[in-house]
Amino acid sequence: MRKPVRPKARKTAPPRQPKGLPSREDLIAFIATQGGDVGKREISRAFGLDGSDRIVLKAMLRELAEEGLIGRKRRKLHLPGALPAVVMSEVIERDEDGELIAVPIDWDEEEHGEPPRILVQLARRGRLAGPAPTVGDRVLLKTEEIPEVDGRVGHTGHVLKILEKSRSLVLGLFRRDAQGGGRLIPIDKRNMGRELAIPTDFANGAEEGDLVSVEIVRHHAYGLPTAKVKERLGSIATEKAISLIAIHAHGIPSVFRRETLAEAEAVKPASLAGHEDWRDLPLVTIDPPDAKDHDDAVHATPDTDPENPGGFVVTVAIADVAAYVRPGSALDREAVVRGNSVYFPDRVVPMLPERISNDLCSLRPHEDRPALAVRMIIGANGRKKHHSFHRIMMRSAAKLAYAQAQAAIDGRPDEVTSPILDDVLRPLWDGYALVKKARDARSPLDLDLPERKILLKPDGTVDRVIVPERLDAHKLIEEFMILANVAAAETLEEKRIPLVYRVHDQPSLEKMSSLREFLQTLDVKMPKTETVRPAQFNEILARFHETEYAPLINQVILRSQAQAEYAQENYGHFGLHLRRYAHFTSPIRRYADLIVHRGLIRALGFGRDGLPESTTPEELAEIAARISASERRAMAAERETIDRLIAHHMAAQIGASFKGRISGVTKAGLFVALDDTGADGFIPAVTLGHDYYRYDEAHHALIGDQTGEMHRLGDRVEVKLVEAAPVAGALRFELLSDGSRFDGHRRGPRGGRTRFQRPDDRPPRAARGGKRR
């Protein structure tokens, strides 16, 4: 008789508590060993949990998250501030022992504080492909925790790949000395205080206040390193120089390689072969008035199918960049390094050379252009019923600006819009009205965050700052592009082609806990649950709409959100409330869209220039990480350039007073955004008054210990400009207005107990003066 086979012992399960439940300490320890890539399913399997135990496990994990002991990203659990197993990093310095130190590029300092320092481990000689990394290089590291030494380094990182080599030139401000030479004040904040000496014969004609790029020619055992001026970029007083600061400081490639330009010039226009002839369809482009490249065109018409009464056919055509930029070409190699185009007030640093972006691929009116088009059938309820993709040759019927198209619909057509008003524009608006029904039913996150736009004078300096009106023309294009992006993701998933998704995770449990705590101060309760929907935020926004609290609520909800990114793994787009979403509509300026285009070409048999069969999910995951970092780099550069421009514009207004709103609160002080320009400045907490002000995280406020005076995020204030530093883009203010008085009670937006009172029993702030300590 055969003996019964005993099941093998579970090797991975740690010691179990009664009923199979692990302790809190066991959970935290297990999550820590998984490198930030573990979910409830893996935990249940490791500890051998079943039905009823899993319900308790879910509650335990929620409690740990609310206490800030664990975090979540992409539905996976991790320890707060923990590094993933593989991370994109930048080598920032050598320590006193000569070891290379790196920090992760993608790090949320607001949530986790200072980025962890990683000790770079070099492979033994002969094992590392290519040169060893140096300071300034971007590298892919496999990380491992180590015991901290003097609280400095807690991780090692083994180099998997060098992604981008460092730049040899340093940008800075030239300050002349009495001997005819001078010193360089570096622009990069990481090099602040590390001046370079420039002898007279190395100055290359640089003048006081010039922005220059220099090459370090000698290091000395004592004293400053010696540098030589390679290029004079102009006076810091011009906007051109200010945008160059950001380009250099963030390492944005701004000059195309010779082989890339040669390849672009050699490209011949695409022919009709292999394309459907759609040149008679009156597609139109609608863009900002100063747009130079036009990569999307739209058309809409009522659906004549009797099975779709009241429906529409919406067509979105996108420039066929894949027809000119082939995988592995010089154009492609440089495009993936750039990742995206970068937009400054006076210039664009394009992802592709102008021969491609502004000429061959730009959907110019009345010129033949190749495109990838998606034809979408919209039902009477506004939802997409089905769609089809086509590789076409098109001819744009008109190039329109947003305001121009809107004016035509509003009864003010011009010579361009008048001929196409009834047959082209009105059907577009009718189609948008239909699509908007589905959009409203979907209820994506609806934050009210006006964007400022800088208008320049002919000399490149600031003329004025405006907040452009949000028109239906903007919303129409936005919704049609979203529909096309969803269609692209759906098709690639259906055909099982790997792709790069545009993803946006739901808010972390830690941030949701902080948001609930804040909302309770306004008598608003938000249910405790692991899942949250955008509609819940929209209900809160609507409750405070057109009240004094509206700007505050918009800012606090914005800060609770995760950052959108690119990923090979799909975990949905929370903000848009979509299960699957991929960028398809801007391949001229985003590499992610080019990847999606190639995937569609391969999936639908549109040609031989599609995504190579050899492309693996791992390769796409690496590309997604790189272009996500490029996107954040571009956003930071654009934001800093605007800050520097406005700081330069306001430098002549020292002593003037302005009205604004508190846009940020930290332990160190208050950030204030001015009404007229949107300029951000800082008020150090030490200058607020005689009291000692403590940071109250729940209320997003600084509160005085003795007086109870409170300065809270979103409060209206009056400030005086006391200092402007154009090179750093920094402004410092002095607070002129009083705060509210905090007495510990709650107050809702429509009455309730008084919580914030004007401290009228004290003299005005301007009369009090003094220091915080």
Image (tube, helix red, strand yellow):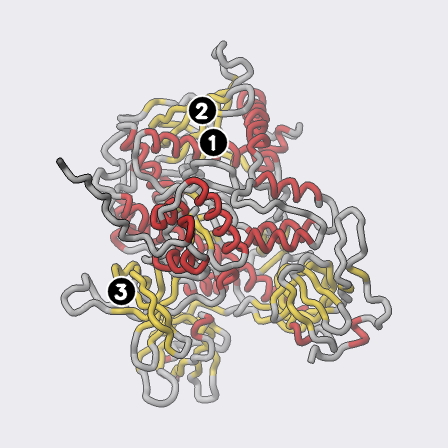
**Total numbered labels placed on residues in the image:** 3
Q: Nearer the viewer, residue 684 or 196?
A: 684
Viewer-closest of 505 and 768 = 505
Q: Earlier in the sequence, mark 3 or mark 2?
A: 3
Query: Pointer 2: residues within 10 angstroms few (<14), some, or many (20+)?
Result: many
Pointer 3 residue: 158
Q: Position of residue 366 (x, y in %)?
A: 43, 29
**Quadrant location, the N terminus:** top left
Q: Residue furthest top?
A: 306
Q: What secondary structure is found at the residue carrying circle 2?
A: strand
Tell whether 253 sits left or right of 527: left
- Residue 114 at what x, y percent from top left? 47, 67
Report the quarter where the C terminus lies: bottom right
Q: Residue drawn 38% across and 49% down?
A: 43
Write down the residue under mark 2: 376
Q: Residues within 10 Å of mark 1 (few under 14, many from 20)?
A: many
Whole-number angstrom distance, CA of label 1 to CA of label 3: 42 Å
